[in-house]
Image (cartoon, rainbow, N blue to C red):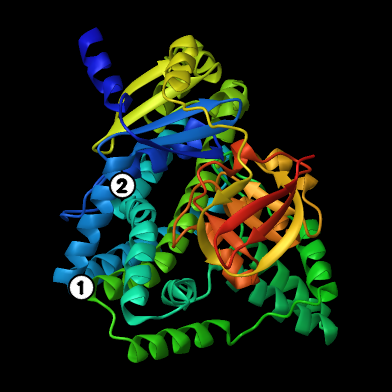
Amino acid sequence: MKKDKNKIINNFFNRELSIEQADGYPAFFEMTSIGFTNKLYDTKLPSYEFGGSYFSRGEVNYIAILENQQEIGKKIIQKYSQDKKAVNLLYEKWRKNYENMLEKYYEIFQEDFSKISDKELNEKSNELFDLYANEVSMPGFIDGFMFYADKRFVFLVEDFCKKKDISDPITIVSILTSSVEPSFFNEEQRDLSKIIKILKNRKDKKIDNLIKKHLLKYSWIKSGYYGYKEYTREELSKELNDLIKSSVKIDNNFFIKNKKEKKEIIKKYNFSKEILAISELSELFIKWQDYRKIYTLTFVALKEKILQEVSRRKSIDFELLKYSLSGEIKNILNSDFDLEKLRDRKRGCFLIHSNGKLKEIYTGKEAVDFRKKITKKTKKDILEIKGMVASMGKITGIVKIVLSIKNLDKVNDGDILVSPMTRPEHISAMKKAGAIVTDDGGITCHAAIVSREMKKPCIIGTKIATQVLKDGDLVEVDADKGIVRIIKKR
């Protein structure tokens, strides 16, 4: 058994690793851990060989093997180039299952679990797991494509521009990878604008119904891997007031313009098949990834609903149950589970998945030591950081490092938000930020999509921004060239 453990853990040593960071707990990150290493239905599209999720103090590091990402990216582009129809049909099949899942989400979200038996509650837990893990499943290969395709795409476009004597490859990259459909963030903003129009007409009864519908429709939107957070009437009122006061207007033609620009540039230049394949896949995966975020956040909302009920019935600290997994709910309800296992995980745990299955759990000192061994230190005497342009523009501002949602409030208007990777829970800070800089991400990542919608400068995939920069540093974000220059250290 010890030999098998070492064999699994050795997969992460002496290999280039990709490490993503987020706020999170095992109970809510479980579906992502499974999905990244699980093949989507019976397809030849690859998944991650191994995935490691390290949890400590309410944060999670997702650790993948870099060569896995590159292999996934290459194979997806090859598959799409050979058979576009197969990839598009796979998306349509997933989308159909996703719509079914969303319908079930709203039904389950409004149920009263306090009125059902322990057996029924466990069945609900099993149904939830089966619905998300098997009936829908997470398309984890999107991230492999994203991390591989950004560098590959920039290289291909720069090479193309050099041969054709075109002076501005970054603009071409930006146009070819731009969103042509609104994200759920943009859709919610539009829904809020509709409420504001009715507010101006003072139709109070209609407003109350609209607010109730809005809060239910987006009931998952404030959640994250850290758990479910209720979307309250107070928050909605604040957002409506902020939108009324804001000088920024929603551009309803933004996506139509993007689509038109993309068509025009493709017609103008004779791009290679690979450039066109990456551009088309980016368009598809941007929307797919947006739906996948809703998939994740709705799972979190329902999983917390189950765990809160288990906590109430069994008088177990809810904070402790955040370290439980779906397969353990039955034994916990039957009082046939050693809660010391959860306490060990709370002190630090490392979960390793392969082929969509949990292979090993390391806890306590063993988990902490493992995390230290695979972490590389970065030099601190760097004055210029390079990354990929996600949204063009140039601005100077004060750095605010956001490693956790606990840091969001320190971002003021015009600050430079620097984060490992942005997620939906970062949107409040992104609205205030003058520019966004991330360690990770690719052409279809959250920061890239939302920064373009907000029309804010954004540089992604720097790898080292959160390690090199400090709160209070004065920097210039040149997102026309993908460079962050440190003007003055704090």
**Residue 335 x/y as whole percent:** 47, 16
**Residue 361 x/y as whole percent:** 37, 20
Report helix, strand or loop for mark 2.
helix
Report helix, strand or loop for mark 1.
helix
Which residue corresponds to the image point at 62% horizontal and 22% vertical from the top-left?
Answer: 317
Disc nearer the start of the sequence (1/2):
2
Q: Looking at the image, is 240 positioned above or below residue 22?
A: below
Residue 481 visible somewhere in the drawing? yes
Dividing the picture into quadrants, the one containing residue 431 is bottom right
Q: How many marks?
A: 2
Left or right placement of residue 345 versus residue 200 in this view: left
Q: Amino acid at mark 1?
A: Lys
Q: Which residue is mark 2?
A: 69
**Residue 427 x/y as whole percent:** 66, 57
Residues at circles 1 and 2 in contact by the CB criterion of under 8 Å: no
Q: Which residue is mark 1?
A: 84
In this orientation, which residue lies closer to the viewer: 326 or 59?
59
Which residue corresponds to the image point at 81% horizontal and 53% vertical from the top-left?
Answer: 412
Q: Looking at the image, is 460 positioned above or below residue 350?
A: below
Label 1: few (<14), some or many (≥20) within 10 Å?
Answer: some
Q: Amino acid at mark 2?
A: Gln
State which quarter of the image contains the N terminus.
top left
Q: CA distance from mark 1 to mark 2?
A: 21 Å
